[in-house]
Image (tube, helix red, strand yellow):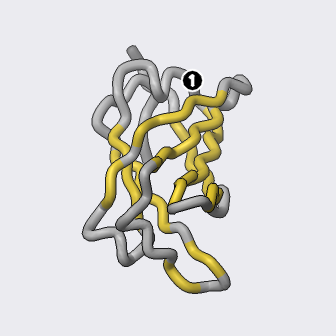
């Protein structure tokens, strides 16, 4: 689990459609939306985890992405052709640090 203030935490999400990974290789937009415990939502540019056929995109956290303790929600968003698609929402906890 990540701690408050951590940088370099990998967030990877798989986008599925009808229970099958969506091929996102040709996606022109790849984002991961991060909803912090305080209510702020950030849109982060994501990259493909592999070749995109597995539906997985990823983002590595930067300074201030994990600035609060609590439960964060994350959701993938892609644009593939004329389709604008959100994936399922996931959650993870950010624990307090002593500094």
- The structure residue drawn at horizontal position 57% and vertical position 41%, both measured from the top left corner, is 33
In the displayed structure, 19 sits above or below 79; it is below
In the displayed structure, 37 sits above or below 63; it is below
Which of the image's four quarters has the C terminus? Answer: top left
Q: How many marks?
A: 1
Query: At numbered mark 1, what does the secondary structure look like: helix, strand or loop?
Result: loop
Q: Residue furthest right?
A: 39
- The structure residue drawn at horizontal position 68% and vertical position 30%, both measured from the top left corner, is 37
- The structure residue drawn at horizontal position 36% and vertical position 20%, both measured from the top left corner, is 63
Could you say where residue 24 lies in the image, as x and y percent from the top left? Answer: 43, 67
Q: Residue furthest front?
A: 82
Answer with the quarter of the image where residue 69 lies: top right
- The structure residue drawn at horizontal position 30% and vertical position 61%, both measured from the top left corner, is 49
Q: Determine whether, in the image, residue 4 is placed left or right of residue 20.
A: left
In the displayed structure, 51 sits above or below 66; it is below
In front of the other: 4 or 64: 64
In the displayed structure, 61 sits above or below 29; it is above
Reading the image, the residue beneath label 1 is: 68
Number of residues whose C-alpha sits closer than 10 Å to that of mark 1, classed few (under 14), some (14–19) or many (20 or more): some
Answer with the quarter of the image where residue 90 lies: bottom right
Could you say where residue 64 lies in the image, as x and y percent from the top left? Answer: 44, 19
In front of the other: 33 or 92: 33
In front of the other: 79 or 17: 79
Answer with the quarter of the image where residue 16 lies: bottom right
Q: Residue furthest top?
A: 99
């Amino acid at each position: 689990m990540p701690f408050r203030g951590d940088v370099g935490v990998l967030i990877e999400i798989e986008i599925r459609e009808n229970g099958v990974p969506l091929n996102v290789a040709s996606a022109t937009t790849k984002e991961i939306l991060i909803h912090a415990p305080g209510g702020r939502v950030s849109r982060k540019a994501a990259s493909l985890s592999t070749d995109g056929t597995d539906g997985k995109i990823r983002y590595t956290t930067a300074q201030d992405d994990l600035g609060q303790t609590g439960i964060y929600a994350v959701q993938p968003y892609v644009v593939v052709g004329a389709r604008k698609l959100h994936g399922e929402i996931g959650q993870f906890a950010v624990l307090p640090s002593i500094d």
